[in-house]
Image: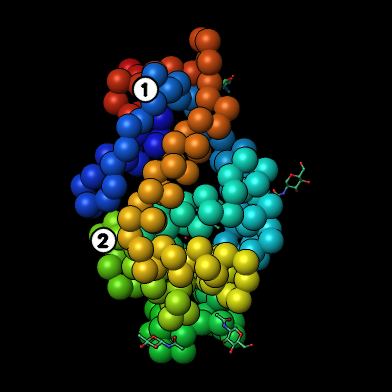
Amino acid sequence: MASACFLMSLLLLGGPSWTVPLGRRDSTNSSATMANSDLPPPQFNLNQLIDSFGNKTLNPTDLVALSGAHTIGQARCTSFRDHLGEANINTTFAASLRTSCPAAQSTSTDNNLAPLDVTTPNTFDNAYYSNLLSQRGLLHSDQELFNNGSTDSIVQNFASNPSAFTSAFTTAMIKMGNLSPLTGTAGQIRRNCWRVNS
Ligand code: HEM
Ligand SMILES: *[C@@H]1O[C@H](CO)[C@@H](O)[C@H](O)[C@H]1NC(C)=O
Ligand SMILES: *[C@@H]1O[C@H](CO)[C@@H](O)[C@H](O)[C@H]1NC(C)=O
Ligand SMILES: *[C@@H]1O[C@H](CO)[C@@H](O)[C@H](O)[C@H]1NC(C)=O
Ligand SMILES: *[C@@H]1O[C@H](CO)[C@@H](O)[C@H](O)[C@H]1NC(C)=O
């Protein structure tokens, strides 16, 4: 399953480890339409994020903890361009991103990448949360988690307490891995987590 692969990636990056429930069945195909109908877009506000995670039995602590996966990886300019012009972004941070992601929509800049965690882009740590405290969330949806709302205190806790983050993250990852797994003969147990069995 995806979370076993994700776990292996985290181990390489110095992230937390946890016991993965084994024998999860993966689909043999994927659907971009289905994926996009269930994945929240980066334009969502806090209430919409809480609602969409709630629809999957994930609570606001799970939402904030799982968003901490944005301690690694990158996003395309199209995913954060509009956020650069919003009021709740660090002006120094926004100005530096504007050099590769200018305000005007253009196919020549749409796919330019920026790290989701500006301070430690290749390390699995809790810097994602301290970035939010200095208004350096890359996505609109990231900064929504610390924008004078009900999840501010969770962000503050994870920013100052790495083990609280690690513990909440692993709890939420296991919860996510238990969401309607395939059963019976549906799908397959992969021999290699990142590809369909040959
Ligand atoms: C809270 C709701 C979330 C939203 C709105 C969101 C949105 C996004 C967006 C827009 C990107 C960049 C995609 C692009 O520009 O092509 C991204 C990247 C990423 N997201 Fe999320 N995400 C969310 C939650 C999560 C969760 C729960 C995880 C995993 C536990 C996760 C892991 C990642 C990773 C690892 C990347 C980087 C991918 C790469 O570099 O190839 N995200 N996310
Ligand atoms: C959550 O589920 C409700 C009921 O199915 C649906 O109306 C709503 O659009 C969903 N919210 C999100 C953000 O997916
Ligand atoms: C903006 O980010 C810088 C670090 O690049 C930080 O020193 C400053 O405090 C941040 N400003 C605000 C308002 O958080
Ligand atoms: C929260 O509200 C205060 C006062 O309205 C404002 O100065 C501050 O910038 C806001 N912080 C965030 C993260 O939006
Ligand atoms: C895709 O995989 C799912 C789960 O194994 C299965 O139910 C579905 O029939 C498959 N669809 C196609 C088009 O193969």
Circle 1 sits on which residue?
A: 22
Say which residue appears at 64% left-offset and 55% top-offset.
Answer: 50
Amino acid under label 2? Answer: Asn
Q: Nearer the viewer, residue 109 or 25?
A: 25
How many other residues sit within 10 Å of disc 1, few (<14), some (14-19) or many (≥20)?
Answer: few
How many other residues sit within 10 Å of disc 2, few (<14), some (14-19) or many (≥20)?
Answer: some
Say which residue appears at 41% left-offset and 83% top-offset.
Answer: 93
Tell me the quarter of the image containing the C terminus.
Answer: top left
Pinpoint residue 36: horizontal percent, then vertical percent: 60, 46
| Residue 138 shows in this picture | no
Q: Nearer the viewer, residue 173 or 117?
A: 173
Q: Residue 76, which numbered label?
A: none
- Judging from the image, what secondary structure is the residue with disc 1 in? loop
Circle 2 sits on which residue?
A: 122
Tell me: 10 left or right of 70.
Answer: left
Pinpoint residue 101: horizontal percent, then vertical percent: 45, 77
Pinpoint residue 179: horizontal percent, then vertical percent: 55, 32
